Amino acid sequence: MPAAESPSSAPLLSESIREKIRAYIPRYPDKRAVTLPALHIVHEHLRCVPYKAMEEIAEILDLQPSDVHDTMSFYGFFPQAPIGEKRVWICRSISCMLRGGDELLGVACKAAGVAGPGSTSADGELTIEFAECLGICDHAPAALCDDGRIYGPLDEQTVAEMIQDVRSRTVPPDEIPL
């Protein structure tokens, strides 16, 4: 008699998520190129990309899980544990750091009510993280919201306004840019 399937072997990705990933395949030269859009799709739906999801993405794209992990870890935008409904990165690259980015990261955490970078507010709404470089040095010190909004140049006043703005705006998941 075959052994019962363990809960960990049940699929994590719904058929809807799988179809969204498959829909990207014809748009790219090969399946490997769909890895980044697939990670965005999974993150959009689960607010994280657990290892099990990486395995399932690899299966859909005929890759090894390590290939998916390589892409995921390169970008650093895809946590393996759930995060808040909204996410903000405060840049701490050299341009932003020289203009007070490190201090403003602390100000943002305090304004958002999170323990520190990488933490989520008690209501589960907002995660504040640091980024090594957002590529928006002309806005230094700068921040990026996961819906694509850019904030900067920041100071203590504009950080408080940014947190209020992020908390007050809602963006339907299908409008979040991939």
Image (tube, rainbow, N blue to C red):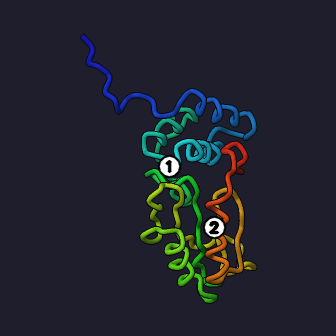
Residue drawn at 35 percent across, 33 percent down: 8
| Element marked by disc 1 | loop
Residue at the left extreme, as displayed: 1
Give residue 176's mark: none
In terms of sequence position, does the residue under pointer 1 or pointer 2 come before the other?
1
Viewer-nearest residue: 72 or 8? 8
| Element marked by disc 2 | helix
Residue 64 is situated, as x and y percent measured from the top left of the image, at 48, 41
Viewer-nearest residue: 135 or 82? 82
Residue 141 is situated, as x and y percent measured from the top left of the image, at 66, 80
Amino acid type at circle 2 is Gln
Residue drawn at 54 percent across, 60 percent down: 126
Amino acid type at circle 1 is Cys
Residue drawn at 73 percent across, 46 percent down: 175
Viewer-nearest residue: 4 or 57? 4
Q: CA distance from mark 1 to mark 2?
A: 24 Å
Using a 10 Å C-alpha cutoff, classify the residue at mark 1 as few (fewer than 14 neighbours), some (14 to 19) or many (20 or more).
many
Give residue 48's mark: 1
Residue 72 is situated, as x and y percent measured from the top left of the image, at 53, 53
Image position of 140 (left or right of 89): right
Image position of 76 (left or right of 5): right
Provide the residue designation for mark 2.
164
